[in-house]
């Protein structure tokens, strides 16, 4: 008999008897003390013209030269690197490594792992606040969100979530976090300071990624197995519209959207359609699909360049990254990376 899935309710949290839990293990107590020093390197050190690609089964992060689109290094990581995020100066790259329950810390200048932060079981996606005070980690296997104080190296809150949490989105003021629960088909709204869920909303099957429109009025959520994008009104926290996709020649069951990014002006959204092997160009105002671009096999996550001229698409089953010229609406190059690329981050 299949066990029931416990759905977290508004106000749910885990308490540590009024104490904060100090992170230990993997040399964290010693190595983490060095992180604030590394983070204070001048911001001018960033902008190296590099792309970083996490490879789930290769246990590496591939480093690409953005100008030549050539691989310049493979960085060995802990097993199953997935979600990644930079610090503000882009001197440090944090990589969630799901099979070893750690976040690897890569020095973006040295291009090597210099530290590891212990996490809950199977970390998948992570984010940090704009002021770099807090880190948020979605732990897939124990259905929790960890909120970590990076300066003091302590676990502030462990928030119970729906089963298999994944997508994490933090607001600009660092006060509110939105989180997807794949199995519960739910989006949680979380008060960061209190470490509690304040509201839930049901969306389509297996929600993956969350993005907010630049005007802060809408959340866009990809629902992988129902093949849709759900649009949520931020103020009412209710679903207002649903967008469906069907590239030519594909069956509906093959359409599994995951990656999602919006332009700075909020006019266009780009959605990677998973096993449908395409990226959709969507007019945000009209909700109309303008174009489909054929990319690699199982288009997973999609990343937009700073000048918004190029998309980088991680293709999980063809083990490559597709480089898409947005104006020409076509792939200009496919770059072999490692086994099952998951995400691309740019240091432009």
Image: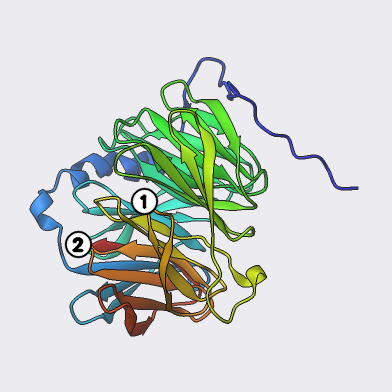
Q: Which of the pair 288/188 is nearer the observer?
A: 288
The spot of residue 7 in percent (x, y) is: 69, 34
For the C terminus, the image quarter is bottom left
**Viewed as shown, does residue 299 lie left or right of 204?**
left
Q: Which residue is mark 1?
A: 285
For the view shown, which residue lies furthest in the top direction? 18
Q: Secondary structure at mark 2?
A: loop
| Front: mark 2 or 1 | 1
Give the mark, 2 or 1, whose residue is nearer the N terminus. Answer: 2
For the view shown, which residue lies furthest in the right direction? 1
Q: Is 67 above or below relative to 147? A: below
**Viewed as shown, does residue 269 lie left or right of 130?**
right
Bin the neighbour count of mark 1 within 10 Å (Cα to Cα): few under 14, some 14-19, many 20 and up: few
User: Would you say residue 120 is visible in this rendering?
Assistant: no
The spot of residue 229 in percent (x, y) is: 52, 54
**Viewed as shown, does residue 182 lie left or right of 230?**
right
Please state the total of marks drawn on the protein image: 2
**Residue drawn at the location 56% of the way across and 57% of the way down:** 228
Q: Is 289 above or below relative to 231? A: below
Q: Secondary structure at mark 1?
A: loop
Between the residue at mark 2 and the residue at mark 1, the CA separation in whole angstroms equals 40 Å
**Residue drawn at the location 19% of the way across and 42% of the way down:** 37
User: Would you say residue 334 is visible in this rendering?
Assistant: yes
**Residue drawn at the location 32% of the way across and 66% of the way down:** 52
Bin the neighbour count of mark 2 within 10 Å (Cα to Cα): few under 14, some 14-19, many 20 and up: few
Q: Which residue is mark 2?
A: 109
């Amino acid at each position: 008999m299949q066990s029931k899935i416990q759905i977290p309710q508004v106000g749910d949290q885990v308490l540590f008897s009024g104490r904060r839990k100090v992170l230990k293990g993997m040399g964290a107590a010693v190595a983490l003390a060095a992180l604030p020093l590394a983070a204070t390197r001048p911001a001018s050190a960033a902008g190296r013209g590099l792309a970083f690609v996490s490879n789930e089964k290769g246990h590496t992060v591939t480093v690409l030269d953005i100008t030549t689109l050539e691989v310049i290094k493979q960085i060995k990581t802990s097993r199953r690197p997935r979600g990644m995020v930079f610090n503000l100066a882009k001197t440090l790259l944090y990589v969630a490594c799901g099979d070893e329950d750690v976040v690897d810390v890569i020095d973006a200048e040295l291009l090597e792992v210099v530290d590891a932060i212990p996490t809950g079981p199977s970390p998948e996606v992570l984010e940090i606040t704009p002021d770099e005070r807090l880190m948020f980690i979605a732990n897939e296997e124990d259905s929790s969100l960890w909120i970590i104080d990076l300066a003091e190296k302590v676990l502030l809150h462990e928030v119970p979530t729906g089963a298999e949490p994944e997508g994490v989105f933090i607001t600009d003021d660092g006060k509110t976090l939105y989180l997807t629960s794949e199995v519960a088909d739910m989006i949680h709204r979380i008060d960061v300071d209190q470490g509690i869920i304040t509201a839930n909303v049901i969306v389509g099957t297996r929600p993956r990624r969350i993005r907010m429109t630049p005007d802060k009025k809408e959340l866009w959520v990809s629902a992988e197995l129902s093949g849709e994008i759900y649009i949520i009104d931020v103020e009412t926290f209710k679903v207002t519209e649903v967008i469906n996709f069907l590239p030519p020649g594909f069956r509906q069951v093959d359409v599994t959207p995951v990656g999602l990014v919006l332009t700075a002006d909020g006019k266009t959204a780009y959605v990677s359609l998973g096993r449908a092997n395409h990226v959709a160009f969507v007019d945000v105002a009209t909700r109309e699909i303008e174009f489909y671009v054929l990319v690699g096999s199982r288009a997973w996550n999609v990343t937009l360049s700073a000048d918004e001229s190029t998309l980088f698409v991680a293709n999980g089953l063809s083990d490559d990254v597709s480089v898409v010229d947005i104006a020409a609406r076509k792939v200009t190059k496919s770059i072999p990376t490692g086994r099952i690329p998951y995400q691309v981050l740019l240091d432009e």
